[in-house]
Image: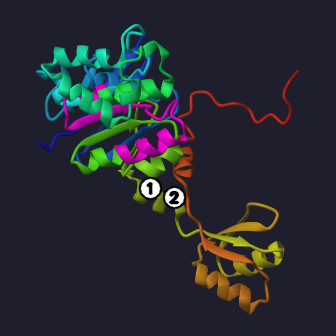
Amino acid sequence: MSAAGIVVSGLRKRYGPVPALDGMSFTVRPGRVTGFVGPNGAGKTTTLRVVLGLDAVDEGTALVGGTPYRSLRHPLRHVGSLLDAAAPHPARSGRNHLLWLAHSQGLTGRRVDRVIELVGLTPAARRRAGGYSLGMRQRLGIAAALLGDPPVVLLDEPFNGMDPDGVIWLRGFLRSLAAQGRAVLVSSHLMSEMQDTADHLVVAGRGRALADAGVAELLAAASGDRVALRTTAGTHATTVLTRAGATVAVTGRDTVTVSGLPADRVVALLGANAVPFSEVSAHRATLEDVYLELTRDAVEFRASAATEVPR
């Protein structure tokens, strides 16, 4: 399999006065799952459509294996994509939908049956797609994306509609695609799934990439040198630790977060000053923490913090 990926460079696009893309740039490399996340209006869908040649841009380029999508001959052999799980004709069986796509690309019925087996749809392959659940339509869309055995796979919100077993299957499946040397780009709103699946993350906001880094790197940066402390003597602990140069923030009735001191130093100070505590642990940020911090100023719609539902 050739070492192909996606390179997005300086994409700019406006819909009237509204900038949909404002310099979007990132790279999806072979051999890893790249998560593509961001709030509504961040430019994710527009970017995916540009990569697949469905939308034009005012400036910039989007290349698959060094080539614009529209220049690819037999594109399913170069990049497989899932943008809309509702796309199959409802009167066609799942298998006939895939056969129609396969024949347009010079692919065989044997390949159709192979991808049906890969995504676990064999028992439902000859049923009408109109009777499929959303999770089954997602599997059918993933099968279509893999028809040409492409080195690049692009999936938009593939976890939507999946039951728990389907989510577990998809996590492992995406990682296996990357392990085969493919470049895998996955757009999702589910940070927990990206934390368990992605090696790399592109965070979009206001039409550009706010972050383009490894998941482990982002989590380490967000975790920082903070220490989580559980104590029934919060005031005493705060006094002792602040005097030693730490910054202390109360996070709950019996919990505080300490910044500026390592965990072993916190333990030593508390012990020396007879401050009771039941837990001291290095703070571990989640990908949701990273996402919320990065997109704090890029959210288009934000609800007010209401304490009571208006009547």
Q: Is residue 9 at least partly visible in the picture?
A: no
Local SS, label 2: helix
Which range of residues does the magenta coloring cover? 144-173
86 lies above or below 211: above
Q: Is residue 150 above or below residue 282?
A: above
Task: Sort mark 1 into few (<14), some (14-19) or many (20+) by Cα contacts within 10 Å.
Answer: some
The percent coordinates of residue 229 (x first, y second) are 70, 72
The image quadrant of residue 231 is bottom right
Q: Which residue is mark 1?
A: 218
Which kind of residue does numbered mark 1 sit on? Leu
Q: Nearer the viewer, residue 275 or 162?
A: 162
Residue visible at 36% across and 44% down?
173
Q: Point out residue 157 in the picture as x, y percentages from the top left corner.
A: 45, 31
Quarter of the view holding residue 118: top left
Res. 195 visible in picture: yes
Q: Is residue 91 left or right of residue 163?
A: left
Q: Which residue is at a point 49% across and 15% down the rendered structure image?
A: 131
Mark 2 and mark 1: Cα distance apart in space:
6 Å
- Using a 10 Å C-alpha cutoff, classify the residue at mark 2 as few (fewer than 14 neighbours), some (14 to 19) or many (20 or more): some
Residue most extreme to the bottom: 272
Q: Are marks 2 and 1 in contact (CB under 8 Å)?
A: yes
Q: Name the residue carrying label 2.
A: 222
